[in-house]
Image (cartoon, rainbow, N blue to C red):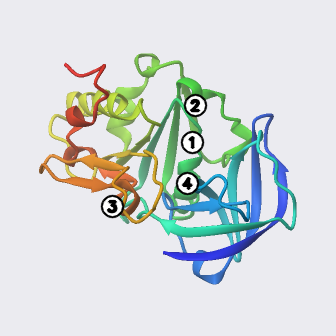
Amino acid sequence: MHQAQAIIERVRRVSAGIQRLELAVDKAHRTLGGGQFFLARVAAAYDPYLREAWLPVEQRGAVIVVERPARHVYMPNQVVDLLGPIGKPFPLRETTRTLLLLAYEATPAIFLLLLHTALARGTAVALVLIGQAGHYPLAALPQAVEVTRAADHAAWAERGQQILWADQIFAAAPPPYDAPAYWRLLEEVRAVRQLPAAEYVYGVFQPPMPCGIGACQACLVRLQSGEDAPACTEGMAFDLLSVNLLQNLPSSTEG
């Protein structure tokens, strides 16, 4: 992890609710993989005290592109203090030729760096946008990606065929939707594939990550082993076969 300043070179509106910032970044911040992110502070003062998670969606040499809600105001030449990269890259296998990505109830921006890596390898990619994720602008996605929209998990009509098609699956949902969504997905995978192999289906856990080094223990994910793993250092993607999803379910959905 490295802390350094970056400069906003360009601000571009992608849709009514989304903008992308092109950042000239320090050399140590130019090597990152899909699934890694930065903790950013825009103001020189410590207000707010906690940094914000900024998701890179594209990398072009010394420029990192991050996606931010349009309600925030940024200006060219503005200085941003970045800490990162945080987390581990998504474990995309070299042998994966068909990749299924699922975004529940939120932007699929967490997958965009992974998308570029997979497509560059010649991997076929399908992206399913479920619930609020279906409002994401298709123009902001690579044209080579096959996109499906569904109002909810039950309305995802092609789930059986796409699970069989995929060499690997990654799903992302914000809390508190994450564990319930991953529970349903794992049940579907087991119904279609009976005994899914390890490193086949992953869930992306995105709890608050104030420190980025696992010290605050705010982002712990309960594993089947009984141990707790900090998402900021061991994630954000976890093999769902290794996660104790019952223990990670919100209390209102348990049982």
In the rendered structure, find residue 240 and report the number of the disc placed on it.
Answer: none
Q: Earlier in the sequence, mark 1 or mark 2?
A: 1
Q: Is residue 248 left or right of residue 106?
A: left
Q: Are marks 4 and 1 in contact (CB under 8 Å)?
A: no
At a point 50% along the width and 61% down the height, the residue shown is 36
| Distance between mark 3 and mark 2 Cα atoms | 25 Å
| Distance between mark 1 and mark 2 Cα atoms | 7 Å
Question: Mark 2 is on which residue type?
Answer: Ala
Q: Earlier in the sequence, mark 3 or mark 4?
A: 4
Q: Are marks 3 and 4 in contact (CB under 8 Å)?
A: no
In the rendered structure, find residue 234 and report the number of the disc placed on it.
Answer: 3
| Distance between mark 2 and mark 4 Cα atoms | 16 Å
Residue indicated by mark 1? 108
Q: Secondary structure at mark 4?
A: helix
Q: Earlier in the sequence, mark 2 or mark 4?
A: 4
Question: Mark 3 is on which residue type?
Answer: Glu
Residue indicated by mark 2? 133
Quadrant of res 56: bottom right
Residue indicated by mark 4? 115
